[in-house]
Image (cartoon, rainbow, N blue to C red):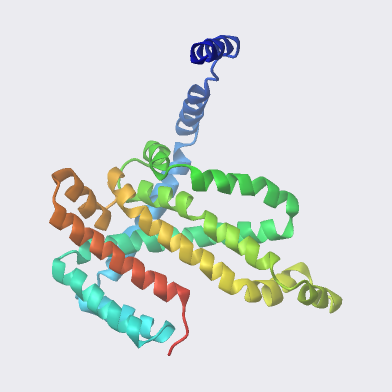
Amino acid sequence: MVLEMGMKMNNLATIIPKLPLADWIEAFVDFLTKYFPFVFNSISKVIEVITENLVKVLSIGPPYVLIILIVLLAWYVVNWRLALFSLIGLGLIENLGYWPETINTLSLIVISVIFSIIIGVPIGIWMSQKGVVQSVITPILDFMQTMPAFVYLIPAVVFFGLGMVPGVIATIVFSMPPTVRLTNLGIRQVDEELVEASNAFGATTGQRLTKVQIPLAMPTIMAGVNQTIMLSLSMVVIASLVGAPGLGTIVYRAITQVDIGMGFEGGLALVILAMVLDRITQGRSKE
């Protein structure tokens, strides 16, 4: 029975030849790299300049200056408990000697999240206003979220080389879908009666969005931003494979050297940073 099924499958393969999908993709990539190198060079330069300047800004003064600023932000946005945790956790990272790597990781996350918001929120708003746009973009978002993260590194390296830039690009592509989805969802979930009331008062589409829908959808939109930050953190270690500096480099080095202690320290630093960013962006009310 199994042999017969195998023979049928072989016969089917001879009738329907394999699609040269890999060849098509490679030809498309070759076309882009040959005729549009100026586009990728420009993007690379912009991201490099932004990254370098952000790292310089975050590195101004001793580490405790930035630690105190983050602690005060945590206290203001959430409560004193998170501020205390941030003080202890970030102080531990500095004590372990991983503060420069933390700055690089924080820069990668901040830049990736900013670009994800700039690109993702308008797309989410567009989806919320046009059902056709939603039906077209939703499968693209499904593809972006289900594709293994490692796959994004291949075109990123081809187009942008090694270093921080391909790490940022791959992180943006991987982490942007939650911002798009939850922006669309938040606006669509606004009470229909409120939308009808704004229309009755003669509000334009822009006024309805800026004064009614987006403010009411802001908690959902911020939840999408929060998820984007968490996905960006999950890409840190993967981005280190293409030369992106940061805490991911520590973890990757520990894996290659089978150094359990270093791996635990690097992983602990990532967990602390993730918890601080997660709680701050959730913006729980102060107690």
Q: Residue at x 34, y 81 (%)?
A: 82
Q: Which image quadrant is residue 77 in? A: bottom left
Q: Residue at x 50, y 16 (%)?
A: 2
Residue at the outermost front position? 1
Instruction: Note whether residue 203 is visible.
Output: no
Vertical placement of residue 198 versus 150, above or below: below
- Image quarter (top left, top right, bottom left or bottom right) of the C terminus: bottom left
Q: Residue at x 42, y 37 (%)?
A: 155
Vertical placement of residue 117 versus 11, above or below: below
Residue at the outermost bottom position? 287
Residue 84: % across, % down: 28, 83
Instruction: Judge from the rendering whether residue 53 lies leftward or rightward of residue 249; answer left or right.
Output: right
Q: Which image quadrant is residue 231 in? A: bottom left
Instruction: Judge from the rendering whether residue 15 lies leftward or rightward of residue 150; answer left or right.
Output: right
Q: Residue at x 25, y 69 (%)?
A: 59
Residue 7: % across, % down: 52, 10
Residue 165: % across, % down: 36, 49
Q: Which image quadrant is residue 201 in? A: bottom right
Count of marks, rendered view: 0
Vertical placement of residue 102 versus 38, above or below: below
Residue 5: % across, % down: 54, 15
Instruction: Note whether residue 181 is visible.
Output: yes
